[in-house]
Amino acid sequence: MDKSTLEMMLAKANNSIADPSRLTERNTNGYEQGRFTLFHSAMSFCSQKVRATLVQKGAAFKSCDMVIIGNRMASSGKLIPAENYHPDYVRLRLIGGKLLSTDLAANYTGVSSVSTQGFDACAVPTLVDLFTGEVIVDSLRICLHVNGTVSNSPSLVPNDPLLLAQMKAQLDAVDNTPHPALLYGFHPEDDRRPQILQELMLSVYDDKVEALQELAADNSADHELVAAYHAKIKKEKGGKNVSRDPSFQHAARSRAREIIVQLDRDLQANGAEWLCGTTVTLADLFWGVSLVRLEYLGLGSLWGDLPRVRTYFSNVAELPSIQQEAIESTLMSMPPSKHLRSA
């Protein structure tokens, strides 16, 4: 896309953010100044992976921090939609979605991987590269793109083919951990999420569907946009249907445990401080964000009997990028959790 058209779409998407103070320049003395614009949310798991990568690489970027949970006004009862549902933002994402070999995500699986679950046009993060004219809408692809274009700092992707394959397997493992299911779902016997978060999740799906239905009706002339809203509605209705399903919630936690047990085996096989070789890679950043989120939700017990994972978590939690973009960002943007403390 030519730069002038992209800048016009960016300006419109920026209007989706109600508070201009959430439009900021990050790491202003960093690499590739003026290149990257990131639409994200402080609390978003996938956004945290991208921000950790940008920070680890030392890249400058424009931060467009979105509110991704709707808010109902106490005085009137009017629902203010999540900013990532705004028509101009969704239109921007649809540009990037056309480059993916996948359909709109309309089924709820509790997993957020674009590669296996499809493209959600009403989500974060979205990276715009003004130097290449690209709109990138999948966190995994964004991180690989940032690593490949910011060449002034150490690469986070191994050159060795074997280590590269191992790293990609780790990225897939994190991407297919059922984080949405664990965040939004009500475990029938052992819900360890902060009480405030549990209360917030009581109405979250109904609010999402209501907002999306109104937006679809208000933009009925834009068929591509309406299709994106309808896919999202179907997905969120599916999420509500399983949010209290005991079998689904047990399976999600069991799957997370299986993935972490495999992480333990991989740590043993590598025999080093980091997962794929002797230096930090994207695998370590992805796992750092993943383990922080699970710890926040009270699920650190998933690796309580795995000393290698416990040590590894301590190591990745000491990375400034993880401290800043996973730990501190979570503590600032989400309800307090007795399970997660500031680094």
Image (cartoon, grey):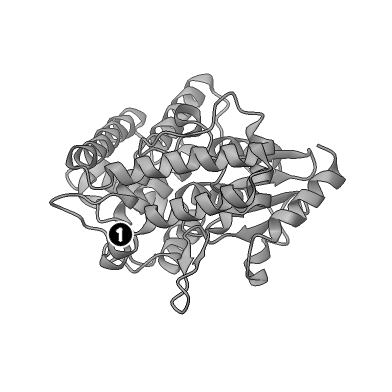
Q: Quadrant of residue 256?
A: top left
Instruction: Report x, y in % for residue 210.
Output: 46, 54
Up-down: is 217 above or below 26? above
**Around disc 1, counting alpha carbons within 10 Å, would you say few (fewer than 14), some (14 to 19), or many (20 or more)?**
some
Q: Residue furthest left?
A: 189
> Please, what is the three-letter code of the amino acid marked with disc 1?
Leu
Up-down: is 286 above or below 263? below
Instruction: Report x, y in % for residue 306.
Output: 21, 42
Instruction: Report x, y in % for residue 222.
Output: 68, 42
Given residues 154 and 326, the one toward you in this image is 326
Question: Which residue is found at the position 27% from the left and 64% from the top?
Answer: 194
Question: Which residue is found at the position 45% from the left and 71% from the top?
Answer: 77
Q: Is residue 179 in view?
A: no
Q: Quadrant of the C terminus?
A: bottom left
Q: Is residue 26 in view?
A: yes
Report helix, strand or loop for mark 1.
loop
Given residues 115 and 239, the one toward you in this image is 239
Residue that label 1 marks? 202
Q: Exactly how many numbered labels are in the figure?
A: 1
